[in-house]
Image (cartoon, grey):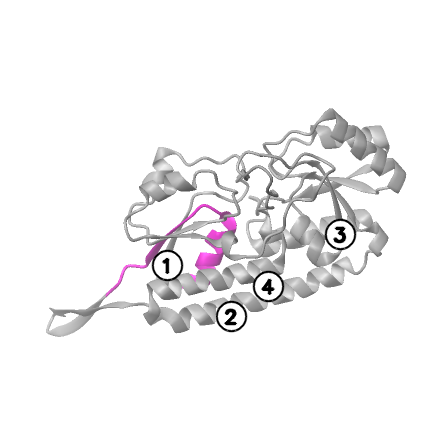
Amino acid sequence: MRRFFPGLVAVLLGGATLFAAEPIRVVSFSALLSEVAREVGGDAVDVVGLVKPGVDPHGYQPTPVDLKTLAGARLVLISGKHLEPYVDKVARVAPAGSVILSVGDRLPSLDAPEGGHDHGHAHGHGHAEGESAVDPHWWHSVAQMRRAVVVVRDALTALAPEDKAQFAKNAAGYLARLAVLDKWIRQQVALLPRDQRRLVTSHDAFQYFARDYGFQIEAIEGLSTEQEASAGRVQELMALIRKEGVKAVFFEDTLNPKVTTEITRETGTRVGGMLYADGPGAAEPTYEQMQRHNVTTIVEALR
């Protein structure tokens, strides 16, 4: 729904013309949240996505040029749960009166699992000593993604209440598609017996997926792609793969598969395929495409 500035009337050629308002400028530091904002906002928003599909959010740092795009932003979207260590910098640069929305912080959290491998003070996932590290990869739960849609819808509605009906309609359509996606995932996962739902991945990004769909995760690296696996962790994981007869090990689109390849060579298991762990990729640029690719790859490799 297009908006109009109240009271602005120009007489042109003997007639009255209303001037359309500028769309809400949204700057997003998450490829997934850029998608949500576009889906919900429609033509009432102008979304600038700084973290593109295929970019590892763990290693991203905003450049001075990136920060300049914040000029005029009314809504700034952050993935949250300590994924972005540069939030304070964004807050200093963002225009006065803009809303900085850390979407993930509005959603239920999972803590990193105890033991196994280091989930300590990873770059971008800092936490106070004695506290658990919060898993920032909330988007692997479709239920969490649906909650994020509602959070963004409400934020846009607060900025442009005159477009409330349009935002609600757009959000409802997107939520319905996500419900279909969740049903499809459950149907595909049901093809795997429970004892075959062991997922060995490059880094620990799939705990929300595991919780929702009944998998057990074994990750080579920790919560962040900035963490490198120790030799002890690699040996421990290879022993588990041999003992449990794990069928496949998966690598990720933004990580070097060297360690994954070494593990498959040493254990005799196989590479299950490539997964999108930290957001959609250049070849699968939407959330639905990312999830369908991941689930199809996992199920085909583990059956």
When asked about the image quadrant of residue 121, the answer is: top right
Name the residue tied to disc 3.
Answer: 215
The CA span between labels 3 and 1 is 38 Å
Of mark 2 and mark 1, the one earlier in the sequence is 1
Span of residues in magenta: 20-42
Instruction: Say if mark 4 contacts mark 2, CB within 8 Å.
Output: no
CA–CA distance between discs 3 and 4? 20 Å
Instruction: Reply yes or no: does residue 300 show up in magenta.
Output: no
Label 2 Cα neighbours within 10 Å, binned few <14 / some 14-19 / many ≥20 = some
Q: Which mark is residue 45?
A: 1
- Other residues around mark 4 within 10 Å, as few (<14) / some (14–19) / many (≥20): some
Of badges 3 and 4, nearer the viewer stands: 3
Q: CA distance from mark 4 to mark 2?
A: 10 Å
Residue that carries the numbered disc 2 in the rendered image: 172
Image coords of residue 88 (percent x, y)? 39, 40
Label 2 secondary element: helix
Q: Residue at x 63, y 52 (%)?
A: 140
Indicate which label's residue lies in the foreground, 3 or 1. 3
- Sooner in the amino-acid sequence: mark 3 or mark 4: 4
